[in-house]
Image (spheres, grey):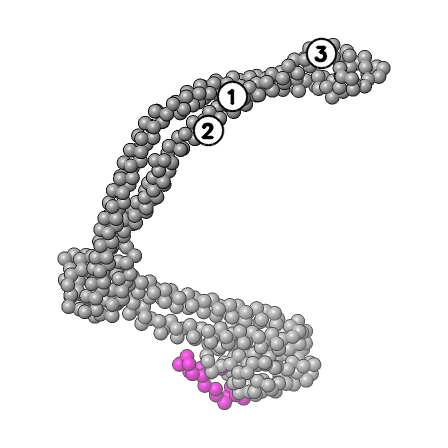
Amino acid sequence: MLGKAVKNRIEEKTQGAKASLDDAYKKLHDAQQKILSLQNNKVKLYQQIARIFLLESPKTTNKQIQILVDELQEVFCHLNKRTDELEQISVNYQQKVNSLQEQLDEKMTKKIFQLENNPDYVSLFTIFKKAEERLNKESKNYQLSLDEFTQKIEEYKQNRCYNYLIERNFGKDSYKGFWIFRHLDAWVARFINFAENHKNQKTLEALIKESQQRYETIKTAHRLASEKKEKIEHDIEESLGLPQLRNDLNQTNLILENYKKQKSLTDKTLNDSLSGHSKQFNEISSKLAKLLQQQSINEVVQLTLQSNSLEDDKVIQQIPILDRKIQQVEQSLPTIKHTVEALEYTYMRFEQTLSIFIQNDIPSSYYEYNISSSKLDELLNNLLNKDIFPETIVHVLISCRSQANSNKTINWSSSNSTSMFSTTSSPKQTSWNSSSRSSSTSSNSSSKASSSSSGGSGFSSSSSTGGGGFKTTDSF
């Protein structure tokens, strides 16, 4: 066999050992995850029991559990007290809002009465209403005129010939046209009736300006009338204290809404606590669940008998079942871990064998190995025996190595294979007989002689592992 084929076979064996190791790792991980899952399920069962017990909160002789029950009752008491306080505060502020609203309505009535009996205000109000009506009417007319005039002007701007003459200042003193261009401009002007259209455009622009000025005048008159009217209204409101009263009412309403919101949240927290869904309930329930896990199963059973619910009686029956499942998986862990350790060691030995072989098979095309595929597998399988070292395996391979296309070869026979390694019925023990030692010594001598004649087939190893009847730093 060529050195490359031997190397590939060792790599296959190494990968096989790695695959077995990965499979063992997966089994170990699955077992650990199963234990974790079962333990989590067990914790959930205790949490269910704790939740059911706290919802009823019966009296118990267990002092630690009773402390947690009393803690939950204190939460209920505090929330009930808080919601009553917020209810009373909300009622008080609602009464204050009602009182302020009554005062506001009363003063608004006084304001209207004073305004109706003020001649100046009545006159200004009449002027204001007329100005408002006129402004509303003028706003509509102004918008209609603006839309119509703007559309007409836009049509002029879209006429390319018309714009051409405008850009050349046709018809103005600044117009400059010579010879043929002046005649062409005049012809274009006659063709599009420029004089009349230009006059119409100027008229439209003047109408827009006039309409805008009229609208601004009416708008200003309306603003002045409104300001005078509002000044009298403001003076009367100030005299009656209406601005401060409105501010007090707004602030009181904001405070009332805040207390109503607090009461709504407190009511929700109380209802969630009573139904076992609030944060405080869950915290106390978790404490009780941890405490129950420290109790014996019989003590937990006695605790569930104190509640009226039958649900916790069903839940408690599942705990021993989970305990047995956890125990079964835990019992399998030592075997799985032992398998993992053994496979890790085997994989490491195959890797060492491959590494040492690569170090001593350079250049690989220079050598060939007089060993069959089946005998190579038989040789590599000896790595499963802990008493056989990787250096020994490589040493045997080197002993049957020769130069490629050389007549000086060392034959690997079945007797050599069986004499090199002799194993007992126990997979963990290996015995070396005298004949195999002689064969190994003879093989070493032949290998050394071959090395001398072929230019060097020496064996070296960087591994620190010893064994197999030779030193790792020696050469053959």
Residue 133: image location, x then y, percent: 45, 19
Label 3 or label 1, whichever lies nearer to me, is 1
Residue 172: image location, x then y, percent: 76, 17
Element class at badge 2 = helix
Residue 174 belongs to magenta span:
no
Q: Amino acid at mark 3?
A: Ala
Q: Amino acid at mark 2?
A: Glu
Say which quarter of the image contains residue 95: top left
* Residue 360 in view in this figure: yes
Find disc 3 in the rendering and name its residue.
195
Residue 348: image location, x then y, percent: 50, 75
Left of 1 or right of it: where is 265?
left
Upstream in sequence: badge 3 or badge 1 = 3
Badge 1 density bin: few <14, some 14–19, many ≥20, Cα 10 Å: some
Q: Residue at x 67, y 81 (%)?
A: 456
Find disc 2 in the rendering and name its residue.
227
In whole angstroms, how far apart are the C-alphas of marks 3 and 2? Answer: 48 Å
Label 3 or label 2, whichever lies nearer to me, is 2
In whole angstroms, how far apart are the C-alphas of marks 1 and 2? Answer: 14 Å
In whole angstroms, how far apart are the C-alphas of marks 3 and 1? Answer: 35 Å
If the image is split into quadrants, where does the C terminus sit? bottom right
